[in-house]
Image (cartoon, rainbow, N blue to C red):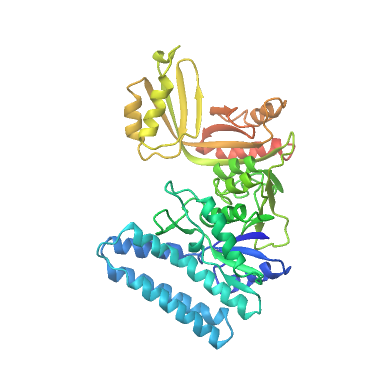
Amino acid sequence: MKVLKFGGTSVGSPQRMKDVCRLITADNQRKLVVLSAMSGTTNSLVEIAQYLYGGNKAGADDVINRLRAKYYAHVPDLLSRKENQDDVQKFLEDKFSYLQSFSKDNFTEKEEKIILAQGELISTYMVTCYLKEQGVKATLLPALDFMKTDADAEPDMNFITEHAAKALESVPDMQIFITQGFICRNAQNDIDNLQRGGSDYTASILGAAIKADEIQIWTDIDGMHNNDPRVVDNTQPVRHLHFEEAAELAYFGAKILHPTCIQPAKAANIPVRLLNTMEPNAPGTLIDNHSEPGRIAAVAAKENITAIKIKSSRMLLAHGFLKKIFEVFESYRTSIDMICTSEVGVSMSVDNTKHLEDIVAELKKYGTVTVDKDMCIICVVGDMVWENLGFESRALDALADIPVRMISYGGSNYNISFLVKGTDKKAALQHLSNVLFNNK
């Protein structure tokens, strides 16, 4: 069985829902399909919660009524039979009445999580009803019955594996199983969500839990590219990536996939395929545990980076200095992207500047601190095993005319990163593309 995930834009209208249904039923194979909320719905649900937090019940009701009208208009466009339309209309009325039942008084995060879950509950119900109307053996498996996180807010894989299997076994004659992405229950059994990567994460977790043949992530983008096609000319889709390469690209700017999402699939050795709903016959990008020796696969960029340099003679031959530095970042819950050291100094980059002033003030206790803002990390991904010859010089040659603030290599066998000015991003990416992929 394959696990297929479709995002909000893929189910963003009645016609898109029908297109998705044609995709998942084209080959008559059994599939577990993970769906997001219709595009725009989650934003509206967030807005409802914000109004309730602010004590503005009238504002929340106004958003609910607009959302209700939008969904009601979709029903006759999706379903042709009157009895099916009536069924979905009643379901929608129950959901929107439920949303209006929340009070501005004592509104908490617990209630907010319940509100945010309604988008996926609605989209999956509508798609399942359409499939049934088309004569497909389809059933809705509520994710809240088997998706659960533990006390550390991490997926409870033992629970998920056991209960997902029971859910599938309870309806053995079905062809298509529909479930919700993003939403789950937490260790207290309250409605919650997976936060990181949302529906992609759900698909990867379920794929690992049921030992799927393949996990497919369907979006409106043709897989991962060897560079950002919005910035660089003559980019090409990357048809195959190692899990580690995909994770690096996802972290450093490839928006098609959240970096944490592929970890369950990687651990279970289940291939992930990125596919395009607009071009369903395109091969997409296959991600698995196989690497291609000697290949540079792609380049990605991460903007809005801040570089921090601490220089101190006390660091020379001293132990414990780096520990003190890292403890400053830990105390402000700020992660570090890149790090480079010398005998008397250390440079780091961060993408979260919420506590930058406080961090810099703390670091000044240990040395002279300089800060460079509006920087950009350029990440070259591929087979970067240190025994390979020449790949570093090719990348450095491409950046010969670009000032480089930091270089990071050796922390991964799949990545070499360069920190440059944000204003040099486009030129750096184009030069790397020309040298590494276009032989210019």
Q: Quadrant of residue 283?
A: bottom right
Count of marks placed on residues: 0
Picture layout, residue 73 above or below residue 191: below
Q: Is residue 212 at all visible to an observer of this figure?
A: yes
Picture layout, residue 3 above or below residue 241: below
Could you tell whether 246 is left or right of 185 in the image?
right
Quadrant (top left/top right/bottom left/bottom right) for the N terminus:
bottom right
Q: Is residue 10 at all visible to an observer of this figure?
A: no
Instruction: Give whichever of 392, 388 is nearer the camera.
Output: 388
Quadrant (top left/top right/bottom left/bottom right) for the C terminus:
top right
Tell me what residue is drawn at x 65 percent, y 62 percent: 277
Could you tell whether 226 is left or right of 82 in the image?
right
Tell me what residue is drawn at x 68 percent, y 67 percent: 23
Residue 281 in picture, x, y percent from top left? 73, 61
Residue 246 in picture, x, y percent from top left? 62, 44
Instruction: Give whichever of 93, 270 is nearer the camera.
Output: 270
